[in-house]
Amino acid sequence: MIYSQQEPPTRREQDRLLVTGGAGFIGSNFVHHWCEQYPNDRVVVLDALTYAGNRQNLADLTHLDNFRFVHGDICDRPLIDSLLQEEAINTVAHFAAESHVDRSILGPDAFVRTNVVGTFTLLESFRNHWEKGGKLESDRFLHVSTDEVYGSLGPDEHAFTETTPYAPNSPYSASKAGSDHLARAYYHTYGLPTIITNCSNNYGPYHFPEKLIPLMCINILLGKSLPVYGDGQNIRDWLYVGDHCRALDIVIHKGQPGETYNIGGNNEVKNIDLVNKLCELMNELAPDLPIRPAQKLITFVKDRPGHDRRYAIDASKIRTELGWIPAETVEGGLRHTIEWYLTHRDWWQPLLSQEYQAYYRQVYV
Ligand code: NAD
Ligand code: TYD
C-alpha cells in the first residue's frame, strides 16, 4: 500500500523526539513536518547553530508548548544524557552533521568530530538511556545519512541498493560512512533499535546558500556568475525535501530496527541540465533579473577534487516494504523552491555574510 500525506501510518499515543541538527536544512523541514502531522508529540531540537544552523528556520514554532530548542553540541555527553532523561525521549532523529563536500575538502577535522565522534556520543548516550528504561523495542534511533557513502557510479551501473558496498570518496562521505557503521554496529552488538536511511541530494526551502540549487538561484538574482564544476556532466538524483521528510516519518513508524532504507527521487539529472533548467524557470518567474536570460551567467570552473561522477538511488525497498514513493516532480519541486527563494530574501540575504564571502573566495578561486 502507498501512504499518502492524508493517510499517516499507525502510531503510538505520543512520541517524544530529540531532533539533532533541527535548525539546518533537512532537520528544520522535518521538524515542521512533524509538528504539523503530530501536534501532540514532544519535539526537542538540539543544534549547535554552526554556520549552517539558523534559529530563523524554526521561528514560527517557538510558541508551541510541545516544542523546545536547545543550543548545544552532539559531542557534549553530559548535555545529551540530561536531555534524554529529563525529556523522556523515546525517538532520536539524528540529522546533525557537517554536510558540505567542498567544506570537507578545505577542512576535514570538523567532519570527523561531528559526524563520527558526535554520532558515537549520541549512540552511547541513547544506549545508556534505553538500557535504563528497560530496552523498549518501540524506541528508535533514526540515523539520517547520504547516498554518497556508496561512492561514484559509472554511466551504465545499476543505482545504489542497500547492499551496495561502501566506497566513500570525500572526507564528508567517509565521515558519514563511519557514522553509519557505528549505528549499524549498535544494533548488532547491543540490540539498540537503530535504523539507517541513505538519501540522495535534497532541495527545497531553507537550503543554505552554498549548495548547488540555492547558490544558482541566488546568483541569478544577484547577476553573479553561475560556477559549474568541470564539464557539468556529473549526475545527481534530486529529491524534494518534503518527500524526504515524509519518508523519514514512515521509516520511524514502520521501519524495522537494524535495517537500512535507501531514499531517492528517481530523478537523475546532469548538473549542466539542472542549471539550465533553473535559468529557464528564473527567467519566467523573476521579473527583474539584472542579467537576462540567466543562461548568460553560466561559467565552467575548475573541478572539485575527487568529484564523484554519478549518484543514483534504487528506492525499491522502501517502496515495496513501507509504501513510500516521492510525490513531487523535478519541475514542480524546482518551481516551489524558486518561489520560496523569491519570497524569502529576508531569510537568505543575511546569510551572505563576511564568513560566507570568505568561504566563497576560497572555493571559487
Ligand atoms: P545542514 O548542514 O543544512 O544542517 C546541519 C545542522 O546540524 C545545522 O543546523 C548545524 O548547526 C547542525 N550541527 C552541525 N554540527 C553540530 C554539532 N556538533 N552538534 C549539534 N548540531 C550540529 O545539513 P542538511 O543538508 O540539513 O543535512 C542533514 C543530514 O542529512 C546530514 O546528516 C546529512 O549528511 C544528511 N543528508 C543530506 C542530504 C542533502 O542533500 N542535504 C542528502 C542526504 C543526507
Ligand atoms: P552539492 O550541492 O555540493 O551536493 P553533493 O556534492 O553533495 O552532491 O553539489 C551538487 C552537484 O553540483 C555536485 O556534482 C557538485 C556540483 N556543483 C557545481 O557544479 N557548482 C557549485 O558551485 C556547487 C556548489 C556544486
Image (cartoon, grey):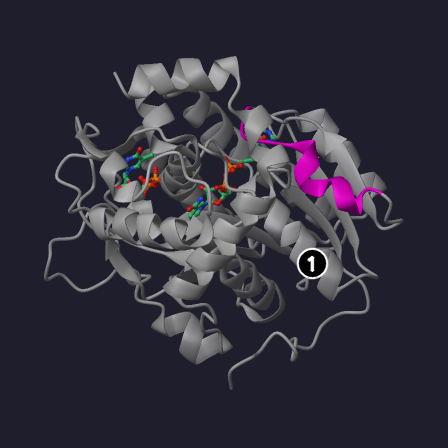
Q: What amino acid is found at the position of numbered circle 1 in the picture? A: Trp
- View extreme (right): residue: 65
Q: Residue at x 59, y 45 (%)?
A: 343
Total labels: the figure holds: 1
Is residue 289 within the magenta segment?
Answer: no
- Placement of 341 over or under 226, stated as above or below: below
Q: Residue at x 20, y 41 (%)?
A: 308
Rendered-image quarter of ligand 2 = top left
Horizontally, is 173 left or right of 323 in the view?
left
Q: Which residues are magenta?
A: 51-62
Horizontally, is 87 left or right of 180 in the view?
right
Residue density around tag 1, few if under 14, some if 14–19, many if 20 or more, within 10 Å: some
Q: Residue 332 in the image: x percent, y percent?
A: 44, 65
Q: Residue 193 in the image: x percent, y percent?
A: 58, 57
Q: Residue at x 45, y 77 (%)?
A: 321
Q: Residue at x 56, y 59 (%)?
A: 245
Q: Which residue is mark 1?
A: 34
- Placement of 349 over or under 87, stated as above or below: above
Q: Residue 310 in the image: x percent, y percent?
A: 20, 50
Question: Closest to the observer: 334 or 118?
Answer: 334
Whether residue 186 is visible here, answered yes or no, is: yes
Image quarter of residue 62: top right
Is residue 58 within the magenta segment?
Answer: yes
